[in-house]
Amino acid sequence: MKNLAILFLAVAFTCTGCATQEELYRAESHLGSKITAIRELAGENRDLINSNRDLINSSRDLINSNRDFINSSRKIQADVGADLEGLRDSVQKLRGATEKLDVQVSLLESKTEDPRSALNDISSRLTYLENYLGIGKTEDKVGEDGKVGSPEKGEPTLTGREEAYANAYSMFKSGRYEAAREEFQKFLKAFPDSEFSDNAQFWIGECDYFKGKYEEAIIEYEAVIKNYPTGNKVPNALLKQALSFLKLGDKSSAKLLLQGVIKDYPNTTPASVARKKLIDIK
């Protein structure tokens, strides 16, 4: 390219007839400087282009990195949102459980505000059960004050074994099962052959039954059957043995006892209850 420029200048000067050898060298030198400058500028531009290309590539990497960061941030935000939603559900459930507990506590407080009322309710249920099973007839002699006799009929208040029995039975009806059990045992020890003895033995079994001691209750009911076979509490004792076995999950033994009550005491209230229980077991 340099030679071409010199040749061009030589021809031009030759044609004009004015160019000298010194001017030719001068022009060549000036042109070479220009070309060198252009080359240097081109090199700088090339370096600048390369630098810009590197900057563009770095920018692309930065953009991709930012895009990954944004995607990761969105995922984290979504996870946090899900966690917050789960936390809200848990808090709502906890509030519901707390409200339910408050209601139960309120009900419990309302039930325990008047213990005497609760005892009266227990006494009423026992009276209903006794009448339904036909096991309260002998206890009709026991008055509300725990005394034996019927003042409205003009009968005198008795003492001795009747008083001891009435005291134990009154404890039982008020739900004081452990104290009643002890009193009935004392009564049997003092009066083993009285008209109330089979009843006292039966109520000992009832004390165990109502305390959830079903194995002990079965043994006490058996004592009624063996020690007082002609007493009026035998069918009731057999029935309550069956119910105790049911509480223990022994349906086979319960069925046998219920069938025995129906067979041996067909026209009694315990037999009627036994028939209903057999239907329920099936």
Image (spheres, grey):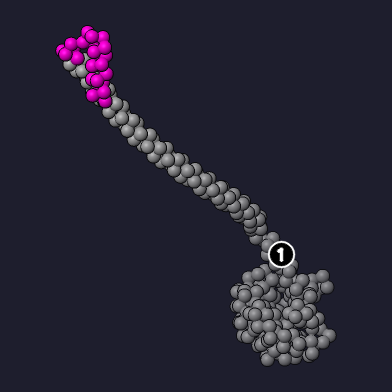
101 or 200: nearer the viewer: 101
* Picture mark count: 1
160 to 52, vertically: above or below: below
- Place of residue 81 in the rendered image (x, y in percent of width and height, measured from the top left): 53, 45
Residue beneath disc 1 = 121
Question: Residue 187 placed where, x, y %?
Answer: 64, 81
Q: Is residue 180 magenta?
A: no
Q: Is residue 24 above or below residue 43?
A: above
Please identify the quarter of the rendering in which residue 151 is found: bottom right
Identify the residue shown where x is 63% and y is 85%: 219
Nearest the viewer among 100 and 168 is 100
* Front residue of this view, candidates 180 and 39: 39
**For this view, does 9 lie left or right of residue 175?**
left
Of residues 43 and 253, the one nearer the viewer is 43
Quadrant placement of the C terminus: bottom right
Q: Is residue 134 visible?
A: no
In the image: residue 167, left or right of residue 127:
left
Amino acid identity at mark 1: Asp
- Quadrant housing residue 36: top left
186 versus 143 height, above or below: below
Q: Position of residue 141 (x, y in %)?
A: 76, 76
Residue 4 within the segment the image draws in magenta: yes
Furthest-left residue in this view: 22
Above/below status of 20 relative to 279: above
Q: Residue at x 17, y 16 (%)?
A: 25
Secondary structure of the residue carrying tag 1 is helix
Region of the chain picked out in magenta, as a range: 1-24
Q: Identify the residue at the far top of this view.
A: 18
| Residue 96 shows in the view | yes
Is 136 on the left-hand or right-hand side of 27?
right
Q: Quadrant of the N terminus?
A: top left
Image quadrant of residue 42?
A: top left
